[in-house]
Image (tube, rainbow, N blue to C red):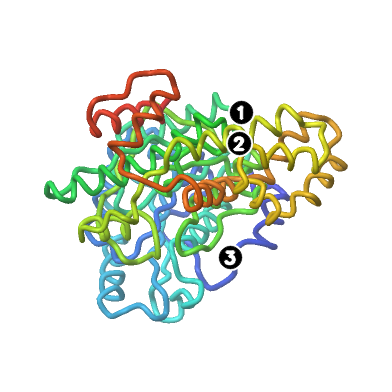
Amino acid sequence: MTAPPVATQRYLDRNGIKGPWQLAGEARSDFRGAVVVPSLAEGDRLFATLRSLSDNPPEWTNRFLVVVVCNHGQRADRQIRLQNEIDLARLSDYARGSDLCLAWVDAVSPGLEVPAHRAGVGFARKLGMDLALPSLDWSGDPLLVGLDADTLVEDNYLQTIDRHFLLSSKGAAVLPYRHQPGVDPDQQAAIDRYELFLRSYVYGLRLAGSPYAFNTVGSAMACRASAYVRCGGMNSRRAGEDFYFLQKLAKTDGVGLLSGTLVYPEPRVSERVPFGTGRSMARLLAGDNQGVRFYPVAAFRTLSDWLKLVEYNISANAEQILLLATEISPVLSGYLDQLDWQSAWPGMQKTHQHLPRLQQAFHVWFDGFRTLRLIHLLCDSEFGRGEPEEILPEYFTWQGCVAPASLGGMLEALRVADMA
């Protein structure tokens, strides 16, 4: 066991969450990694998740700390408060009979509730990860793993994550996921459509050659603790925290695709966050498909042309590249004007005169968020959006393969592609 290095302590001093919160339960500080589980009034779901973790072999559960962050904001309603109090009490009892090395954070008791303006899943993830850092064995290269309290894992989960980082040079990874079955045909159809939407976006990015072609699911991500510190840690967003966190990691240390195990999020309806799975499920089950309309291939072909334009004209000046971008799409050139391309590109060229470094700097600048924004602008202004039956076969044609005959077949094909 080795204490956190200077860089980690500096991160905690400057960027770590400050407040009254601390870890309770397991007191060891020699862990290979920590699995951080935010929990907001989850009840039996939380303990099902913990039981799935405990199905991993003892030699692995002994090496990973599991941190449950019971949390709610100061304005939480009575039902949430009561359920969180029950969950917190159950954790203490559960820990005594479990093979897990279990710790928890009380962010629900009077004086420990999360300030209303900070409450949300991003804050809970950050709180758990920041508090876990001193419990890790820094003589090696310890890991931080993101999981959700409604997500089941397989019995090789911990060892597969460990093996991935022993073999990978990248600082982070996304895990394959597959939603649990719906409780009825309507819920199953809704989660299949939403999962297909998520995966088709990543598929389009992959075909376009974007370095941000990976799923951003909070319950299916892991990173080296050193990479966590280097990128500035988790953010405190109420939603989309996983997207922005993985985007930061992609810029600093790279994000790889892990294979060999699966995680299984629950496809439940939720209004807790302004967007994401729960909100989309609610809309779909209410018969509103407009919030989950698919992006046509033409948008990703435009993205591909833009990325190739910069790659093949890496030594050109900003004006030359902008003129070529106009030939690709006036929406693209207008967007670049909004992003102040005329100033940004010369700055990158001045700072990074080695061409591979300049290419990398471009992808840091034109990041995952700006990529998503371009796709939205193209669809809103030029290409529209549509139904998967009419749009998705063109993705497979672009890749040079035959599209599966059914949406279910397409979903399975994209699941396989995301594990490659």
Q: Secondary structure at mark 2?
A: loop
Residue toward you, 405 or 192 = 405
Q: Amino acid at mark 1?
A: Ser
- Residue 56 lies, with reference to residue 117, above or below; the image says above
Q: Which residue is mark 1?
A: 169
Circle nearer the N terminus (1, 2): 1
For the N terminus, the quadrant is top right
Compared across the picture, whether 101 is left or right of 136 comes to left
Discs 3, 1 touching: Cβ within 8 Å: no
Q: Is residue 382 above or below residue 391?
A: below
C-alpha span from label 1 to label 2: 8 Å
Please indicate whether residue 68 sits to the left or right of residue 134 in the image: left
Residue highlighted by disc 2: 254
Contact, mark 1 vs mark 2 (Cβ under 8 Å): yes
Q: How far, Cα to Cα, is label 3 from label 1? A: 29 Å
Tell me the quarter of the picture where residue 316 sits. Answer: top right
Question: Image height check: is 28 above or below 158?
Answer: below
Q: Kindly indicate the quadrant of the structure image that contains residue 399.
A: top left
Counting from the top left corner in percent of width and height, residue 38 is at 40, 58
- Earlier-in-chain disc, 2 versus 3: 3
Q: Examine the rendering and report whether any part of residue 65 can be seen.
A: no
Number of other residues with Cα within 10 Å of mark 1, as a class: few under 14, some 14 to 19, many 20 or more: few
Label 3 SS = loop
Q: Amino acid at mark 3?
A: Ile
Mark 3 or mark 1: name the one nearer the start of the chain. Answer: 3
Q: Badge 3 is on which residue?
A: 17
